[in-house]
Every structure is written in structure tokens, then in C-alpha cells.
Image (cartoon, helix red, strand yellow):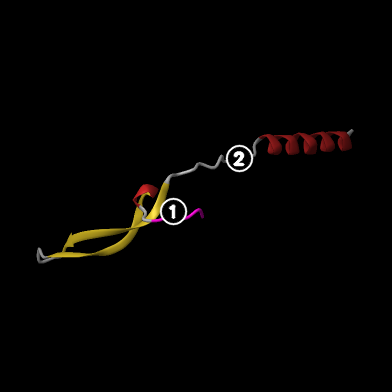
Amino acid sequence: MIRAVIIAATISTLYCLWLDQPKPVMPVQVDYCVIDMHVAAKDDFGQWHTGWTKGYGPCSLLDRYENA
């Protein structure tokens, strides 16, 4: 009798754990690429500094398309 209760509890626990697993995440395609941007910022003294940096933006701003 006790053996049957332990087996039933084990099976029900495994079944509950199987039902509680997270759903798989669907991949989402994002049409943004790493692009070079010309940026400007003010320093502590109010002077503007410009330069190039990498950032994210629409892939249409790239000068070439890379299928990665």
C-alpha cells in the first residue's frame, strides 16, 4: 500500500514538473544592424567634440549588406 502511494506521488510530481516547464521562445527577426555613426557631445566645459562610433540602426543605412 505504501509502495503504491510513493509511486503515485512520484508519478504525479514528475507530471506536474513536466507541465510546468517554460514555453519555447520564438525567435524574432529584427531589421537593425551595427552601423557607424557620426556623433557629437558636449564636455564639461561646453565644448563640442565629434567622432565616429558604432551603434544600432536600420540596415538600410549600411553602405553594404552582410548576411550574417
Quarter of the picture holding the N terminus: top right
Nearest to viewer (mark 2 / mark 1): 1
The residue under label 2 is 24
Numbered label tally: 2
Residue 53 left/right relative to 23: left
Q: Quadrant of residue 26?
A: top right
Q: Main secondary structure of the magenta part?
A: loop
Residue 51: % across, % down? 24, 65
Residue 2 left/right relative to 38: right
Q: Which residues are magenta?
A: 64-68
Could you tell me how far apart the alpha carbons at marks 2 and 1 are, in whole angstroms? 30 Å
Residue 14: % across, % down? 75, 39
Amino acid type, mark 1: Tyr
The residue under label 1 is 65
Indicate whether residue 57 is drawn in magenta.
no
Relative depth, front residue between 62 and 45? 62
Relative depth, front residue between 27 and 3? 27
SS class of the residue under badge 2? Answer: loop
Amino acid type, mark 2: Pro
Residue 44: % across, % down? 13, 65
Residue 38: % across, % down? 25, 59
Q: Which label's residue is closer to the chain start, 2 or 1?
A: 2
